[in-house]
Image (spheres, rainbow, N blue to C red):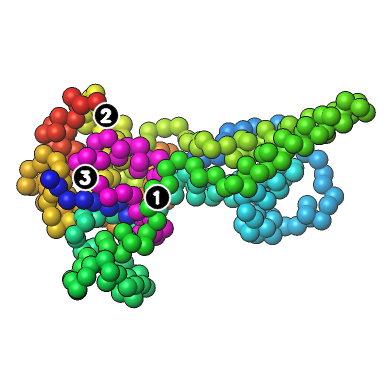
Amino acid sequence: MGQYWRLLNIDRKAIYGLYKFGEWFPYETSYSLDTVLRLPCLPPEIDKWCKKASRVVQHGPLSRLPAELVNMIFSELRPKEMACLAITCTAMLEHSKPHLLRFYTEVHASWARVRLICLGQTTHHPPGLLTEAEEAEIAETDLSYAYGNDEDHPCLSLFSSEVYEDLLGIGSRWPREIKEIKYGLYRWIEEEGRRAGTNGKHYSARRAKRDLTMLRTLFWPRATYPPGARVLCNLSKGVYVREDTLGVGKRNPATLAHVLAVQICWSDDPSFALVIDDEHAERMMRGEWAGDRFCIVTLGTMPRLGGDRQWRDVTEDVRPLLEHLWKENEYDSTNF
């Protein structure tokens, strides 16, 4: 029948489901993992606004602050205040870029750059995966009601099912305050429009519409991504997989999310609810990437590794396992 699995985001204490691997893997993997690992970029409209806008000399005290202090201010602002400050002038919009990008990454790529593992239901986590503080937290948490008198219970597996937030973070989780800004501006536009009908002043209403357009662009719940060949980066090991040269499957091609899923499994039980031979099952039971950190970017936007480390392409190394799964489970003849 196959055991149940949990996809864990250890750093954010988030968990995705309790599922049988073979029932989830071919159908939901691409959508589930791809959308929360892919790093976004800034909307192109921001650069257009900065280039198009005329530079007006600001005389207020904020304009006289050094860039370091302005960045410190932005780093302390919530998204609501960040948006309002960013659209006040071109200089503030320029300063806001790295902070907006940080916000977009938190919203759209909430599972990027964190430790990920797909853990079997009755399996102990790999040694060295958790910090001493995390191990202590599990030990100090009373889970006796969940496992009875069994002292040899699977710590992280049980702890995550009881404590972690059951959320993958798919798509955009936009703060309620952003909606409040939008609807507040809508009301203000309507009020200004009514006033314009009596005194002939239209500038304020037009400016409000411009501000609303900018806010909707900055915080519209659609991510913007850079063009180019996509790659899955294992930030912990300094290796990557190219999607354009993976070449597994024709009708239903394997994706980078499928690559990740089969590389981060960890289990003492070979039950995957898949057609798989012993050799490949043993490899999946001890996933080489279990507990590592990842992101999906393009070849031109791969992050730098520390020190003298250089990225290494391992596309050829991960292909055989996927080819085996696609062939034995007839994924190309299935409607995903």
Q: Residue furthest left?
A: 278
Q: Is residue 180 left or right of residue 88?
A: left
Q: Which residue type does callout 2 highlight? A: Phe
Q: Is residue 278 left or right of residue 236?
A: left
Q: Is residue 71 left or right of residue 292?
A: right
- Distance of mark 3 from mark 2, alpha carbons? 15 Å
Q: Which residue type does callout 1 highlight? A: Leu
Please tell me which residue is depicted at 75% across the width and 57% down the height of the picture: 65
Q: Which residue type does callout 3 highlight? A: Phe
SS type, badge 2: loop
The correct choice, above or below, for 68 with respect to 207 in the image is: below
- Distance of mark 1 from mark 2, alpha carbons? 23 Å
- Distance of mark 3 from mark 1, alpha carbons? 18 Å
SS type, badge 3: helix
Residue where numbered disc 3 is placed: 21
Residue where numbered disc 2 is placed: 336
Residue 292 image offset from top left, x and y in percent: 31, 56
In the rendered image, the quadrant that contains the C terminus is top left
In the image, 108 versus 304, the foreground residue is: 108
Magenta highlight on residue 26:
yes
Please tell me which residue is depicted at 12% across the width and 51% down the height of the picture: 270
Residue 324 image offset from top left, x and y in percent: 13, 37
Residue where numbered disc 1 is placed: 167
Residue 18 image offset from top left, x and y in percent: 27, 50
In the image, 246 versus 329, the foreground residue is: 329
The crowd level at tag 3 (other Cα within 10 Å; few <14, some 14-19, many 20+) is many
The range drawn in magenta is 9-37
Q: Are marks 3 and 2 in contact (CB under 8 Å)?
A: no
SS type, badge 1: loop
* Res 11 seen here: yes
